[in-house]
Amino acid sequence: MASIRRRGKGWQAQVFKLGVRKSASFRTKAEASAWSAKTELEIQTLQAGQVPDYPFSKALERYRDEVSVSKRGSRRESIRIDFLLKDPLAAVPLPLLGAGHFATWRDRRLREVSAASVLRDWGLLNHVVTVAINEWGWLKENPLKGVRKPKAPLPRDRRISQLEIDKLLLAFGYIQGQPPRATTARVGAAFLFAIETAMRAGEICSLQWANIEGPVAHLPITKNGFPRSVPLSPGAIKILESLPRDTAMVFNLQPSQLDALFRKARARALIDDLHFHDTRHEAITRLARKLDVLDLARMVGIRDLRILMVYYNAQPDEIARRLG
């Protein structure tokens, strides 16, 4: 049964049904009453072993509000979920949700975006469904298991030539060894720093002066959730020495700024098909000439050596020259 009572400036609702107790606070009594009725029905449905008659959008929204918020990339994932909520897939009732609905979604998306983009959303949808099964009892089985995944594209092997680096630095307005005055010039410094260190864009933007100790940059938070310390090359140290120390952040850039200004500079330099993340490929390939495999993996934060091969893009002629 439900109990609704005044608490401070709002209302608290408590539900106890079939041995399950839940409570929540609301701004108005009407909201508390609606939640109580819905929660009682949900408990009764789940206890009876039935799938609740919710649209799939309900699972997407609950995942966004309860699971995504705990992730480092919560903002980006929330944006992806908000986009999925506009898709016809979101309107399908959970009791009817099947492999055919996801196959139709897959084919529709493949006509709009690349297979890589579909696979990223696939991973997200699969986790939403898994949580709905294991934690919420909203589904009995995973309909994605019966759907054929799009074929994964080949890994990028884009290298960055010295000519492209020179053209980009000109577009950035960054002169090596001189303090970068404009924001665009700081992106140029960050671009060179990425090639020297193999650090990701987010790691560079979050780097603080307090985390630099001699020839080492300490990263307390990284993409894979593990802290790491990055040895700095003489080239990386020279870049740091040219930067002003008037803020706590080394490059004083937001990831969105870096991305937007990099794209603009790339367009001015008339360079095609180059991403900032390609600096990681270039850096790892260069560092592989100086470090053994384990030291390289430790420096760049890769725990699976098979992934290291994705980023190592030495050309056959480079390898042939080292054989002479």
Image: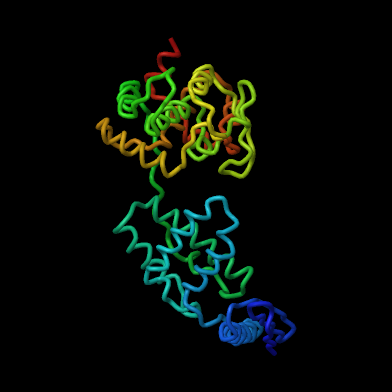
Q: Position of residue 116 (x, y in %)?
A: 40, 50
Which quadrant of the figure has residue 28? Answer: bottom right
Toward the bottom, the furthest residue is: 1
Residue drawn at the location 41% of the way across and 49% of the way down: 152
Residue drawn at the location 41% of the way across and 27% of the way down: 181
Which quadrant of the figure has residue 136? Answer: bottom right
Judge left or right: residue 317 versus residue 230. left
Does 169 appear above or below 23? above
Q: Position of residue 297 (x, y in %)?
A: 58, 31
Q: Position of residue 299 (x, y in %)?
A: 59, 29
Q: Quadrant of the C terminus?
A: top left
Does 13 appear above or below 151? below
Q: How many marks?
A: 0
Q: In this rendered view, identify the residue nearer to me: 81 or 31.
A: 31
Does 241 appear above or below 57? above
Q: In this rendered view, identify the residue nearer to me: 185 or 266.
A: 185
- Viewer can see residue 190: yes
Judging from the image, the colouring scheme is rainbow
Q: Position of residue 155 (x, y in %)?
A: 41, 40
Q: Quadrant of the N terminus?
A: bottom right
Residue drawn at the location 46% of the way across and 42% of the way down: 255
Which quadrant of the figure has residue 106? Answer: bottom left
Residue drawn at the location 32% of the way across and 25% of the way down: 164
- Viewer can see residue 50: no
Q: In this rendered view, identify the residue nearer to me: 60 or 8.
A: 8
Q: In this rendered view, identify the residue nearer to me: 27 or 120.
A: 27
Toward the top, the furthest residue is: 324
